[in-house]
Amino acid sequence: MKKINIIFWISTGLLALLMGVGSISNVLKQPEAVAMFQHLGYPVYLLPFLGVAKILGVIAIVIPGFPRLKEWAYAGLTYDLAGATYSSICTDGIAPGSLVFLIGFGLIALSYIYHHKKQKAALLHVMA
């Protein structure tokens, strides 16, 4: 159980950091975020919406409880990252910066898998 918790919290913490940093610049409409969004061809008014959605998703996966909300949050973060990956590849092609997307997908997968392992281990512990 200890190993499961450690892997879960490290992957979830890194995921929260990765998604959280990007979402703050979106909410604040920082010039770099606006420029990137315009380069991708999206309207700037979507920036704060996506930023707030990512912050809420990060909060949902970090706080304990709310299993259905966590499922939706993991799905939302995955869709956000998939959309960012697709948009980036369509505008700039596959670039060295695309590695960040692979890291993001890896962190989402690891956090999600170990979230479920943690739930299963807790259930087995209660039943024992």
Image: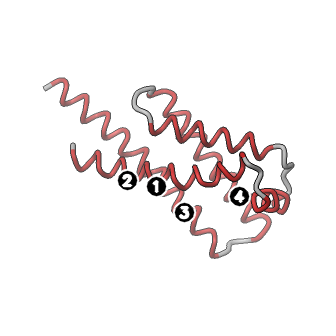
Is the residue marked by circle 1 packed among few (<14), some (14-19), or many (20+) residues within 10 Å? some
* Type of the residue with mark 3: Leu
Is the residue marked by circle 4 packed among few (<14), some (14-19), or many (20+) residues within 10 Å? some
Whole-number angstrom distance, CA of label 1 to CA of label 4: 22 Å
* Residue named by callout 1: 14
Q: Earlier in the sequence, mark 2 or mark 3?
A: 2
Give coordinates of residue 84: x percent, y percent: 69, 55
Is the residue marked by circle 3 packed among few (<14), some (14-19), or many (20+) residues within 10 Å? few
Instruction: Tell me, yes or no, whether the two marked residues, 1 and 3, touch with CB atoms within 8 Å.
Output: no
* Type of the residue with mark 4: Tyr
Per the image, label 1 sits on a secondary structure element best described as: helix
Per the image, label 3 sits on a secondary structure element best described as: helix
Residue at (84%, 43%) from the top-left corner?
45
Which quadrant, please, contains the N terminus? top left
Give coordinates of residue 100: x percent, y percent: 57, 65
Foreground of the two, 35 or 122? 35
Q: From what the image shows, is residue 118 above or below residue 32? A: above
